Image (cartoon, grey):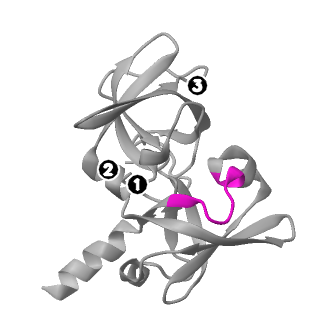
Amino acid sequence: MFSGIVEKIGVVAGVHDTPGERAVSIRTPAGWGFAQGESVSVEGVCSTVQRRGARTFRVVYMHETLRRTTLRSLSRGSPVNLERSLRLNGLVGGHLVQGHVDTTAAILGVRKDGDARIYRFGIPARYMRYIVEKGSIAVDGVSLTVVSATARAFTVSLLAYTLGHTTLGRKAPGDRVNIEVDLMAKYVERLLAR
């Protein structure tokens, strides 16, 4: 479980594909130490540290994760949002994020709004029922507040701080991002359906 507050931007040190999985090595941020088996959010995807070295840590992804996320496009030098798992006695600065990506979305446009930027995302229609104005959403693992929502798109406003401290500030129209809708909305839907 995570809070959607990105702690560091990491850099992919290497990618190794085999027929059954993709192993990704990421440079360990200064001051971070991982235990083998620890969970870390990589671009919003809950990832298990399978191996750690002096300067890198390694995570492995199965086909389902690669199909549902943007991690299939990672290459050496790719920047990635990183967040260590949430401690239950710590502060939750964003909202509860599982790191279980629902789908990807395309950035449809970016416009200035004072010092902030309004990003518009196109998303498969079936996920829009979970997205509401002023609700929470995780985009590449970043906890954000929805500004507006239509039948096929939603917008968020990004402050200069968020643009500078996450990978979102490096993305442009046409790029794809990982989306995790608010978990509570999915549970409410399931309960009402019964």
Q: Which residue is mark 2?
A: 65
Residue drawn at (51%, 75%), measured in percent from left and top?
135
Callout 1 crowding tier (Cα within 10 Å): few <14, some 14–19, many ≥20: many
Callout 3 crowding tier (Cα within 10 Å): few <14, some 14–19, many ≥20: some
Disc sitting over residue 160 in the figure: none
Q: Is residue 133 above or below residue 62?
A: below
Q: Which residue is mark 1?
A: 69
Q: Is residue 194 left or right of residue 79?
A: left
Q: Amino acid at mark 3?
A: Pro
Decide whether residue 194 is among the magenta residues.
no
| In-front residue for pair 116/24 | 24
Q: Which residue is mark 3?
A: 29
| In-front residue for pair 84/111 | 111
Helix or strand or loop: what does disc 1 sit on?
A: loop
Image quarter of residue 22: top left
Stretch of the chain drawn in magenta = 168-177
Cα distance in 3D space between marks 2 and 1 = 6 Å
Residue 130 image point, x, y percent: 40, 78
Give the mark nearest the N terminus, 3 or 2: 3
Image quarter of residue 24: top left
The residue mark sitting in front, 3 or 2, is: 2
Q: Are marks 2 and 1 in contact (CB under 8 Å)?
A: yes
Cα distance in 3D space between marks 3 and 2 = 24 Å
Decide whether residue 170 is among the magenta residues.
yes
Helix or strand or loop: what does disc 2 sit on?
A: helix
Q: Is residue 169 left or right of residue 63?
A: right
Residue 67 image point, x, y percent: 33, 55
